[in-house]
Image (tube, rainbow, N blue to C red):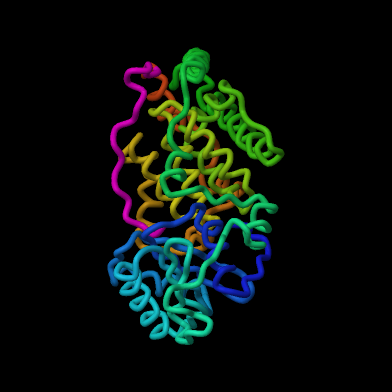
Amino acid sequence: MTIPKLVLSSPADILAAVPYLVGFHPADSLVVAGVAGPQVRLATRWDLPVASEDLDLLVALLRREAVTEVFVVGYGPGALVTPAADTMTRLLRAGGIRVAESLRAEGGRYWSYSCDSATCCPAEGTPYDTERSHVAAEAVMHGLVALPDRGSLRRSVERCGGAAMRQATSRVMADLRAMPEPGGPGADELAARFVAEGLARVRRAVGLYDSGGRLDDEGAARLGLDLAVVRVRDEAWALIDDRDAHVALWRDLTRRLEPGHVAPAASLLAAAAWHRGECALAGMALERALAADPGYSMAILLRQALAHMMSPAMLRDRMPTPAELDDEMGPARAIWLAPLRALLTRDVPGPASASAPGGRQIRSPS
C-alpha cells in the first residue's frame, strides 16, 4: 500500500491512523501495525478473541518482514482486549520486537498499556477524536479511505451488476461463440491472436483506471472473459504493483461480472489487495472467487498464503515477469482457449439465479 508520510506523535495519532491502515473503523478487534525504519511494513486486524497460536504465526511474519517495532491497538471492552494485548506484547518481546505503544480504545476514549502514570493516563481513559485529527486529514488528502465498519468493506466487493451488464455479457459471448472451433486449420494462430488482444486489453484497462476512467459494460464483460485464459490472467497478475489502479480495476470487475465469470477477477483483486497489505479486502475477494468456483486454483493458492501468513513479497518475488511468462509458456496453443469455450457453452444467468452459492469461510488475518 502506498501510505503517505504520516507523523504519529501520540496515542491519538495512532488511533486516527489505524482505520486508514486496515481500510475501515475496527470494532472488537486487535490491530497490529509493524514498522521497519520510517515505514509501516504491514498492518493486520483480528476479530477478538484471537487464538494465541495465530499470534505466534503473526510474530513469525513480523520477523520475516524485518519489523523492528509495532503498535498494538485493541478495540472493545477491557475483558475482551486486555488478554489479547497482553499475549501479543509478551510474544513480541520474546521475539525481540519492540512494542512502541499498546492501547485499548472504546467509546471515544483510550487507555495505554504502556503507561502507568495517572497524570497522563487517567483511570477513566483519555478522550480522542479521529475525525478532527490532522493525521486523518492528511490521509484523506492523499486519497486514503476508512470505511465505517467491516460490513462496509464487505459490501464494497458484493455484486452490483444488473440487467444492462447481463445483456452486455450475452452480446460479448455471442460474438465469441462465432470463433472457429479448436482443432481446425489455424487454431493455434487464432489462440495467439486472442491472447495478444487480451494482453493488450489488460494493459489498456490498467491505464484507464490509473487515469480515473472506467470500462463500459461490454468492455468489462470482454475483459472478464479474457481472464478465463490463464496466460491473460497471469499477465494481469504479473503487472500488479502499488498503484491504486489494480485494486480499482479488479474490484470493479468483481462487482460487475456475472457470477460464473467472476473468479479470475476476484482472485486478482485479492492479489492486488494483499500486495498492498490490505488483508481484509484480500480475504473478502477470495470469498467471492471461491463462491463462484470452489476449485479455482489461484484463489486456493492465495487463500493458503493468507492462512499461513506468508509475506506478500514471498509470492511476489516468485512471480515471473510478462517476458518470463512468454518464455515459460511458449507460443500460444489452441488448448489455452478451452476454459473460455467451456464458459461460452453456458447461458448467462437471469435475475432469479444470478447470486453465487455461499462462499467458504477464510480464516486469515484482516
Is-magenta flag for residue 62?
no
Can you give x and y, in whole percent of width and height, for residue 150 in the image?
42, 49
From the viewer's side, name the closer residue of 101 and 184.
101
* Residue 11 in view, yes or no: yes
Magenta residues (range): 348-366
Please tell me whether the stretch drawn in magenta is mainly helix, strand or loop: loop
From the viewer's side, name the closer residue of 252 and 149.
149
- Taking the image as shown, residue 346 lies to the left or right of residue 196, namely left
From the viewer's side, name the closer residue of 20 and 226.
20
* Residue 180 in view, yes or no: no
- Taking the image as shown, residue 36 lies to the left or right of residue 25, namely right
Q: Residue at x 47, y 70 (%)?
A: 110
Q: Is residue 57 above or below residue 182?
A: below
Can you give x and y, in whole percent of width and height, for residue 7 in the image?
66, 70
Q: Residue at x 51, y 13 (%)?
A: 171
Q: Is residue 61 above or below residue 145?
A: below
